[in-house]
Image (cartoon, rainbow, N blue to C red):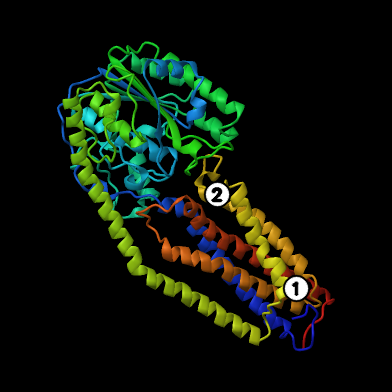
Amino acid sequence: MTASRRPGDTAPTRHVVAAALTLLVVGTVGAVQAGMAGGSFMHDLEQVQPALARIDPVVEDPHTPRLARRVFLVIVDGLRLDRSYELPFLDELRRRGVDAEATAHYPTWSRPNYVAILTGVPPSASGVRTNHHATPVQLDALMDRVRAAGLSAASGTDYDVLPRLFLRPRTGASRTGIEVDIDLESERDVEDPTALGAVRAPDADLASPFNDARYAPWAGGFSEAGAALAAGEAELVVLLVGVVDAAGHAHGGASPEYRLAAEAADRALARALDRVDLAQDAILVVADHGHTDHGGHGGLEPEVVTVPLIAVGAGIDAKGAPRNARLIDMAPTIAALLAIPSPGHGLGRTLTEILTLDEAAATRRRSADDTRLTMTRAIVGASEVDAAIDVLEHRALRLAIVALGALIATVFAVVLIKRRVLRLDLRILVVTVPAFFIVYYALIGTLGQRFSPSLVPAQGHLASALIRYGLVATGVQLLANLWALRTQLTLGDRLAAANGVAWVGLLLAGIPAGLTWAFFPPPFVSLPDPMWLVLIPALEVSVACAATTFALTLGVEVVVFAARAWRRDTTIDP
């Protein structure tokens, strides 16, 4: 079709305006719905009650000797392996003990890996998949085993989330000891105000899993809290320092600021643990994840997944070398040091190769691990199979809904074309429609670090980063639309062509989003891989942004038409 107007090319302008307004409404509704879907994606990843939480923990005491009087577990949030060297205190611990590395678990965000460290359950099975998890974790944790054995647990941190993740009831405990007044049948309760109110109410009958939990966010507070706990008697002390992670988010893992933060954390740990007696006590140092050079984590980049593992002191074989150590192996290993059963929902193993257990005791620990793993792996595997079957059973229906929607949109377009209120001008479409998608996905692929969940350099929501990229692409496409439509000689032609741009753009954005909904519907029992963890919300956000772009384009054209009609300087079709 040509860009110039010919008699009969378009219907009366009032009809074209009516079609434009209809598409404007459809686009607005689509933008709101898709935006809400994209915004809720990370919350949809969460599971309030995963399969493991529905069974009694598998608690088996292997009756091995106690190796350490006290154990200090240090989590340096965000410290990647290569930046953990040339730090005086950590290097001194390395020289006296085990210098190794461990693998963090995907998604490599903090809360999922705090849970992995303290329960032995990775994010795929714990239900804690993002940093937005807000309800107490219903899994057997290292602190539960410590207290069940008549010992005590303590924590010190400059970041307050750790005790809150594992709140426990003072009375009325369930078989897991972890009940809260929340409707656990609803996966949406992760962010439900009623559920959060039950947890946050000042009179809630809940308690920290730690006998002594210290939150010290002021400068020097971490060292002060850590030193006080080291001088105490708690058999398990968990120390979490967040300064390195904050620097990684703000400046990137390759920055001088990140290095300075690592050095500051090292000094703080030295002051906190200076008087620990390594002849009787043990120290284990790990990180929950690393950081990319640009800052950010969540994906499977080597610098994000590989973290330091340092073990030293009583019960640690300084000549030992862990085999394929993972963060989920920390809880059972610490349990062995304290001679208590491992957390009963765990999927990790005891790193007997770095402990001073004799062969008979090591065999008993491994046997207890095998008993637990036989049950927990079966439960997790069965839940994933059931979820996969459910998705397959409903996939045909979802695909049919997507196909029906595309068919209705096509029929609607054919009707509008026959009524001459919608025009598909290839020269305009080639310029306008690709503008958004090229810019949007190029930004995700470059600034978004190759479609990785690590694209969020600042602490926040994955969707918020995608929306920022979408807004840039929206602005580019709006300018492209207005520039291409200027070639139309009358406002009737402009609106008809704008209607065509809106329809094609919405269809191209909507169909891929619909297909991802058909193949990856929430709730997510099985986690999508890193690329899809970005693409699923990206496609939903693209519908919202594309719809917004086309709505703005139609809105501008309608406003221009109304203004010119009011001034009587436009051509009105008969």
User: What amino acid is labelled 2 in the image?
Assistant: Ser
First of labels 2, 1 by sequence position? 2
In what quadrant of the picture does the C terminus appear? bottom right
What percent of the width, then of the height, locates residue 301? Answer: 50, 41
For the point 29% across and 52% down, the residue is 183
In what quadrant of the picture does the N terminus appear? bottom right
Q: What element carries label 1?
A: helix
Q: Mark 2 points at which residue?
A: 464
Q: Of the numbered discs in the image, which one, if any, rests on residue 164?
A: none
Occupied quadrant, residue 226 = top left
Q: Of the numbered discs in the image, which one, if any, rests on residue 562?
A: 1
Q: Residue furthest right?
A: 569
Left-right relation of 172 to 324? left
For the point 32% across and 11% down, the residue is 277
Left-right relation of 541 to 56? right
What percent of the width, then of the height, locates residue 412? Answer: 57, 81
Mark nearest the camera among 2 and 1 is 2
User: What amino acid is labelled 1 in the image?
Assistant: Ala
